[in-house]
Structures are given as C-alpha cells and as structure tokens.
C-alpha cells in the first residue's frame, strides 16, 4: 500500500488546470510512448526558451557529424545517432572505470510552444549539438466583422 501526501494550496484553479494538462498528455496518442529509446546510452541535454526561440543543446562528444540525425514531428524534436567504441589495440585491457556509453541513442523532446519549421537551425561544434527553433508568429488580437441579418 502506498500513501501519497497531497498538499492543497490556495490556487485550486491552477491545480485543476494541472490535472487537465496531465490527463491531456496521457490521452494524446500522437506523442511518443517513451522519451528515450532502449539504445546503448542517453546523451545529456538542456532545453530552454527565450521570448523568440526554443533552444535544445545535446552533449554528443565523440559522435561524428554524419552519424547524427535531427527531425521534427508535430510537437516533438527527435535526435538520433551512434557513437562508436574506440578501436581496441588488440591486447586485453583491464578497465578501472566505465562511464561513457557507446552505440545507438535516441532522444525525444516535447516542444512547449508553436515553432516556425522554416526557421529552425542545427549546428554541431565541440561535441555539442545546438538546435535553435524560432517561435511561430501569432497575432495577439484578431478583429472579426459581424454582419447583421
């Protein structure tokens, strides 16, 4: 049996909105079922947002540029690739520490705002993949003429 402690704040409307957002995410079948694949390793990543952009930075040290694939689908950014193990010297080795992962990887990032697909750039420098997505321009106010019948 599990006991879950719930602390209600004064903002019950915000709590209700959070529950609705959670329910919506659970029922949204367009999203990937898992955020990461069962590949060999999971690269570190940061995602942040400015007033005009959403930026994702992925640590891909040791991955060749030609082994990286970046794609966008609906509200998800996908980064796939492969990091190969260094060539062995042929003699047996005794490892003292193994922290670096090798093999295929895949990361999925939910994009929190509408973006302009035509204004998305990716660059790879010093082992860091940076994907900069410009937010879509939205009209704040739309005037609609109402005709009399």
Image: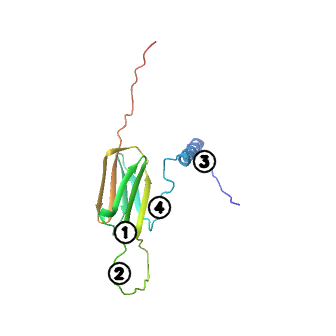
Image marks 4 and 1: residues in contact by CB distance under 8 Å: no
Label 1 environment density (alpha carbons within 10 Å; few <14, some 14–19, many ≥20): many
Q: Which residue is mark 4?
A: 37
Residue occupying the point 37% across, 68% down: 83
* Mark 3 → mark 2, Cα distance in angstroms: 58 Å
Q: Nearest the camera: 34 or 8? A: 34
Residue occupying the point 50% across, 57% down: 34
Residue 144 place in picture, x, y as percent: 40, 23
Q: Mark number for residue 83?
A: 1
- Mark 4 or mark 1, earlier in chain: 4
> Where is residue 136, by image quadrant?
top left
Residue 113 place in picture, x, y as percent: 42, 45
- Mark 1 or mark 2, earlier in chain: 1
Residue occupying the point 33% across, 52% down: 132
Tag 3 secondary structure: loop
**3 or 1: mark nearer the eye:** 1
Tag 2 secondary structure: loop
Q: Is residue 111 above or below residue 89?
A: above
* Mark 4 → mark 1, Cα distance in angstroms: 15 Å
* Mark 1 → mark 2, Cα distance in angstroms: 15 Å
């Amino acid at each position: 049996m599990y006991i879950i402690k719930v602390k209600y704040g004064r903002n019950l409307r915000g709590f209700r909105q959070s529950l609705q957002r959670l329910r919506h995410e659970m029922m949204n079948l367009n999203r990937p079922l898992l955020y990461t694949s069962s590949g060999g390793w999971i690269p570190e990543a940061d995602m942040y947002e400015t007033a005009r952009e959403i930026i994702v930075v992925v640590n891909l040290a040791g991955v060749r540029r030609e082994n990286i694939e970046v794609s966008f689908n609906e509200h998800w950014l996908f980064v796939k690739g492969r990091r190969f193990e260094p060539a062995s010297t042929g003699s047996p080795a005794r490892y003292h520490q193994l922290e670096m992962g090798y093999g295929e990887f895949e990361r999925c990032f939910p994009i929190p705002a509408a973006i302009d697909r035509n204004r998305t750039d990716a660059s790879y420098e010093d082992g860091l993949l940076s994907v900069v997505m410009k937010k879509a321009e939205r009209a704040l106010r739309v005037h609609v003429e109402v005709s009399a019948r």
